[in-house]
Amino acid sequence: MNNQLLSRLDWWAVLCYLALITFGIINIYSNAYQGSPIPLFDYSNFVGKQILIFLFCLVLFLPILYLNPILFEHLAYIIYGLSILSLLGLFFFGTKISGATSWYNVGSIRLQPSEFCKIAVSLLIAYILSGIDANLKNRQTVIKFWGIILLPMLLIIAQPDPGSALVFLSLIFVFIREGGHFNVLIFGVSILLIFLLTILLNPFNTALIIGFIFLLTLYFVRRQSKRNRLWPLVLVFLFSVGFSYTVNFIFNEVFEQRHRDRINVVLGLIEDEKGIGYNINQSKIAIGSGALTGKGFLNGSQTKGGFVPEQHTDFIYSTVGEEWGFMGSFGLVLVFALFIARIIFRAEKHTHTFSRVYSYGFASVLFMHFAVNIGMTLGLVPTIGIPLPLISYGGSSLLAFSLFFFIYLNLDANRLS
C-alpha cells in the first residue's frame, strides 16, 4: 500500500464525509424508530440498507483511490456514453415511481441513473476543458460544454424528473470559473425572474417592467458609451418581452399539474396546507418545534407521528430541525459549508485543469443539492424531489456521491503541486 498517497489524502474532507453519513444514518434511524430497536445490518429496513450500502462504498474506496488518475481522463467519453445509454434505457426497461420513470429495478436493488450521470458529465467537461485548445471564449468550446450538460438534462426531463435535471445547471459555476462569460449567469437569473414575474403578474405587466428597465439601461449606455452599440440591448429586450409572452404556455402546457401547484404554493398564489402544500407545511412545523436545542434523539413528535411524508428521503432536514433544533440544523449547514469550501480550496491548488474542473463540478453539484433541498424543506423553493447529499436515505444517491467524492480524493492526492 502506498502510504505516501494516504498521507496526501484530504483528510479534512474525509472527516466531513464521514460525519455527514454518520449523522444521516442517525436521523434515518430516528425516522424509522417506532419503539423497538431496529436491526442495523438488515437489508429489509431503511437503516440497515443505508448502512450496508455505505459499507459497500467503503469497499470501493481504496480501489478507486489507487487507480491511475489518467484513467479518468481516458475513460471520460466512455463513461459519459454509458450514462446516456442508461438514461435512454429507462424508456424501455425503467420502473415508474411517483410519476417518473427514473429507476431500474434489479431484484431488491433499485438504481437511479441520473445520480451517476452527474459524475459522467463532470468528468467529460473536465476532459474537454483540459484540452490544449480549450477556451470558453471560443464558441465551439462553449457549444460542447453546454451540449454535454443539456443532453442528459433533456432525457431526465422527459422521464419526467425536472428536479434532477435542474441540478446539472449548477455546472454554470464551473463555466464561469474557467473563463466563461459572467453574462451567462446574469442571463439565467434574468430568465428565472421574468418567469416568476409573469406567473405573479401577467405577460403585459412583466413586459412593462422589462421595458422600463430597458429604457433606463439605454439611457445610461448612451451617456457613458462612445461606441453606442445598442443592437445587443435591443435583441435582449425583444427576447425578454417575447419570452414573457410564452411563459403561460410553458407553465400550463409543459409543466405537469403537480409542478404548477408546487410553484404556486411557494409563490403564495395558493394555500393548500392539506393538499399540495401539506409536505412543506408539516416540515416547517417540525423544524419550528425543535426551537434552539431540539426535542432530543428519538423524541420528535412530528417525526414519530409520520406527519411529514418522505421524511427519511427528501424531507430529512425536518427531522434534524425537530430533534436537534437550531443548533443541530446550523451545525449540519456548517459542516456542508466547510466540506464544499474545502473542495474549492483544494481545487484552486491544482495545476492540472482536468482535476480542478472536476473538483469544481463536484462542489457545484453538492452545493445545488444542499441549497435546494434545505430551501425545499423550509418552503423557500418548490418541492422538486432531490435528496440531501449523504444524509437522505437512498442507495443510488449515497453510492453516486461517494463515487463522486472518491474520484475527487484520487485526483487531489495525485496533484502535481
Image: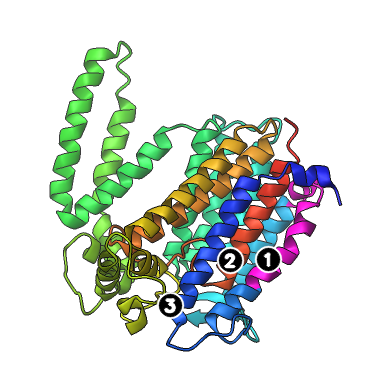
Using the image, determine if residue 224 lies above or below residue 321: above
Asked if one can make out residue 33 in the rendered structure from this viewpoint, the answer is yes
Using the image, determine if residue 224 lies above or below residue 280: above
Q: Is residue 235 left or right of residue 269?
A: right
Q: Residue at x 57, y 31 (%)?
A: 138
In terms of secondary structure, where does tag 1 sit?
helix
The local crowd at label 2, few if under 14, some if 14 to 19, many if 20 or more residues have their Cα within 10 Å, is many
Q: Tell me the residue that label 1 is attached to.
A: 57
Does the CB distance between marks 3 and 2 fall below 8 Å? no
The local crowd at label 1, few if under 14, some if 14 to 19, many if 20 or more residues have their Cα within 10 Å, is some
Q: Tell me the residue that label 2 is attached to.
A: 398
Residue 355's disc is: none
Q: Residue at x 17, y 47 (%)?
A: 206
Disc 3 residue type?
Asn
Dominant SS type (magenta): helix
Q: Which residues are magenta?
A: 53-75
Residue 24 belongs to magenta span: no
Closest to the camera, between mark 3 and mark 2, is 3
